[in-house]
Amino acid sequence: MTRLCVILGDGIGQEVVPTAIRVLERLLPDLQIVEAEAGWGCFERHGQSVPEETLQRMRECGAGLFGAVSSPSKQVEGYRSAILTLRQCLELNVNLRPVRSWPQVSSRADVDLLILRENSEGLYIGREHMQSADLAVAERHISRQASEHIAQRAAEVAGLRASRRITLVHKANVLPLTCGLFRDSCRQVLATAGLNNIVDERLVDVAALQLVESPDNFDLLVTTNLFGDILSDLASHWSGGLGMAPSLNWGQGIALAEPVHGSAPDIAGTGKANPLAAILSSALLLRYHWRAAALADQLESAVERLLAEVSITEMGCETTQRIEQELLRRL
Ligand code: IPM
Ligand code: MG
């Protein structure tokens, strides 16, 4: 039996995740859903954005689907981003973010790349302090272990995708110690995996320009946490924007699928939310965590046909519901 821990979260997470689950249930009829709470609403109810029980349920299921969470605009004592807490506590060390062209929503037809973002360290360790009243300092940690780990995942994904190129993205000209360790550790692992001939590297600023100019030249990009955060939003433009951007937070034997978009409070409850990022995130669980590539292909090709055949921009308040119906019809 396949178990899925479902964390709806806040805002449109409450709408897009149930839709994604109904789609997933069509492909996995024995799917068992285990619900868990996280996010701002959860913090208001329980004083924690991620209760211990949620972590426990995630560990028991091994797979999760996370919707979106709101964050307060001011600093609130005791509150910490739910998704960052989940990534850290569950050791979801790699974030997989595919970007590809889709009919109707993409402005070019030839993009198919995958960003592997280190998901546990870098500037995200959250160590900031005021050294004096006029100097704020943030620490950036890059470890050999985490760098090797993401490179191992890159080798694995390169095999699954039959990648023609792996691009390491860094800023080692300015940060020779941190970015240098990242690059060298990755290179070593990829050489050991026999992939030396397809490994390439780019400085992050150059990579940003080239992702805009010629995204078709990239296949697999491997980078550190903050660079991956920024480049994945930039590149998601080619998929049709954040409404089409899926991700998988990937650990050892545990994975949490997550649409990259936020909780969109402005459209929450209106029925206008596009559930495709959540649905495509569940396809990543199928492909990379459950190793059910045929089902992932089936789901992604149904999304492709839907977008080729039905205009999703005119659905208005019926967007979430109509996309579900149209997709189920094509599965
Ligand atoms: C993302 C988001 C998060 C991040 C925020 C919400 C903390 O931007 O998943 O890309 O920076 O990782
Ligand atoms: Mg981001």
Image: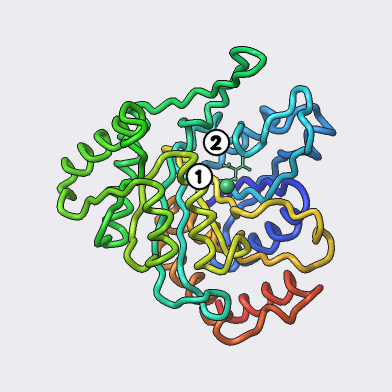
Q: Position of residue 159 (x, y in %)?
A: 26, 56
Disc 1 C-beta below 8 A from ligand 1:
no
Please name the residue shown 24% across and 62% down the image.
164
Residue 241 locus on image (x, y percent): 59, 64
Q: Determine whether 252 is above or below 302 in the image.
A: above
What residue is rendered at 40% in x and 57% in y? 114
24 horizontally vs 151: left or right? right
Above or below 97: residue 24? below
Kindly identify which residue carries mark 2.
Answer: 87
Would you identify the image quadrant in which residue 78 lies? top right
Total label count?
Answer: 2
Report the disc number at residue 249. 1
Residue 221 point in image, percent of width and height:
36, 52
Label 2 C-beta lies within 8 Å of the nearest ligand 1 atom: yes
Three-letter residue code for mark 1: Asn
Q: Front-most of 295 and 11? A: 11
Q: Earlier in the sequence, mark 1 or mark 2?
A: 2
- Considering the image in quadrants, where does the C terminus appear? bottom right
